[in-house]
Amino acid sequence: MENNIQHSDIYAIALHHRFQWEEAQQSYVILFPEGMVKLHGGAGEILKRVDGKTTVGEIVVDLKTTFPDAEDIENDILGMFDLAVGKAWLRKLN
Amino acid sequence: MAQLNNGVAASVTQKQPLWLLAEVTYRCPLHCAFCYNPTDYDKHTKNELTTEQWISALRDARKMGAIQLGISGGEPLLRDDIEEIVAEAHKLGYYSNLITSGVGLTEKRIQAFKEGGLDHIQLSMHDVTEDISNFITNTRTFELKKKVAAMIKSHGYPMVLNVVIHRYNIDQVGKILEMAEALGADYVELANTQYYGWSLVNRDQLMPTREQLDRAEAATNAFRERVGNKMKVFFVVPDYFADRPKKCMNGWGEVFMIVTANGDVLPCHSARVLPGMTFPNVRENGLEWAWKESPAFTKYRGMEWMKEPCRSCDEKENDLGGCRCQSYLLSGDAEMADPVCTKSPNRHLIDEALINSQNPLVREQPIIFRTDKNSKKYVEGDKERIEQFHALP
């Protein structure tokens, strides 16, 4: 899979989108006009670290530290960023 | 497997009213010929819920999992408490959307909505020409709508335009999209008219031809190709031109709940047309009972209610038999397969409607606009006078 995500990239949640925890669904969701995406556990863990300041590389390190037993999560994380950018849930700040 | 997943499965299969539509009033300064509101709305305009009742309903629905909130009508801005409702919705964690004609939106109000945390505003537009826009709404609102569009944009809101498509504007779809682009729209919904309420009364006058529909879809696709991701364009295909019905409301009582101006709780916009149904009201047993236990919400939830040809159909899970209201309105039987389906014994009703709408003697009959005066006639049962316009000569 071709991946355009760089470790130095910084992302924020896209304009007019909102990311929040939904108690009733026990998951994170992204909300936007006329739509909602329910995020699975891993995707939620990644996107909750997207704050407009932290780089992708720092998020990868953070997640590897938080989930030491997960194998080869770096590719999954980059893949999730790629998907989220493609869906326009995220905007690139740098 | 079921046992292993018990806890998880339970939380996944529990149906939640994720989308809450608050139809806060049926009063409206516009008189659109395609309005889906009930033709007898006039009888629901007197007993509107109070601000406190709305806030309490929002709180209850949020606890049940509602997250997307539409504030609609009629024209919601005719109420002077929308600012309060919006602010409360934001505090509760809703993603909220004001669905408006734009009439009544002022700098002062939009500022208050912004401060209160309203997430977006969906504005209705009707055509690129003043003539058609004013004709179909039976008002002079075209210039005002363009000003409101600019106001929405200048306050940093995403520009969400909703354009109802019918035979008077369908040939302009390409130009309508260009207008939307010029206005800076982020999302455009081209909603081909579906036939309920006032639009059913005016069906023969509003229905486009299949050729018009095909051209409009091609124009939409060409526009999408040119503009790409910058603007999202939804093209809602009209039922009558399909051979399978829509999965109406994504299923009865599955994810969608409507609270109407007078507090009735509905699983879909037009459910009150169905015979022999008593809908719950927020003033009585509350939303949780309405959603989980009321006879109205359980009646058509799932597939138990189906009869043939739906019951044994291998596609029944795709569309859940289509729309109960459409079936009832066209065939008189709410539990029959949606007439749109080519497997339905009632499909001929759709085909006949398509043919009738191309009959010049029928389609040139006058439109019945959504006005209080016309609605009162429906309420009074004075239907013959209106129907005679539509009778075949």
Image: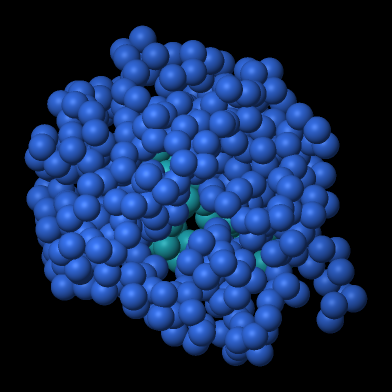
Q: Residue A38 at x, y = what percent?
A: 58, 56
The residue lying furthest to the top in this view is B108
The answer to whether residue B374 is seen in the rendering is: yes
Looking at the image, which residue is at 27% across and 69% down?
A: B356
Q: Residue B368 at x, y = what percent?
A: 31, 43
- B203 left or right of B377 in image: left
Of residues A90 and B192, which is closer to you in this image? B192
Of residues B233 and B323, which is closer to you in this image? B323
Quarter of the image containing the N terminus of chain A?
Answer: bottom left
Colour assignment, chain A: cyan
- B255 left or right of B229 in image: right
Looking at the image, which residue is at 82% across and 44% down?
A: B289
Looking at the image, which residue is at 23% across and 29% down?
A: B139
The answer to whether residue A42 is seen in the rendering is: no
> As displayed, is residue B68 above or below residue B28?
below
Colour scheme of the picture: by chain
Of residues B347 and B96, which is closer to you in this image? B347
Of residues A74 and B239, which is closer to you in this image? B239
Q: Residue A75 at x, y = what percent?
A: 49, 68
Looking at the image, which residue is at 37% across and 52% down?
A: B387
Instruction: Supply the letter of whichever chain is blue.
Output: B
Q: How many marks?
A: 0
> As displayed, is residue B375 above or below residue B329?
above
- B243 left or right of B190 in image: right
Quarter of the image containing the C terminus of chain A?
Answer: top left
> As displayed, is residue B386 above or below residue B115?
below
Q: Residue B249 at x, y = what percent?
A: 55, 58
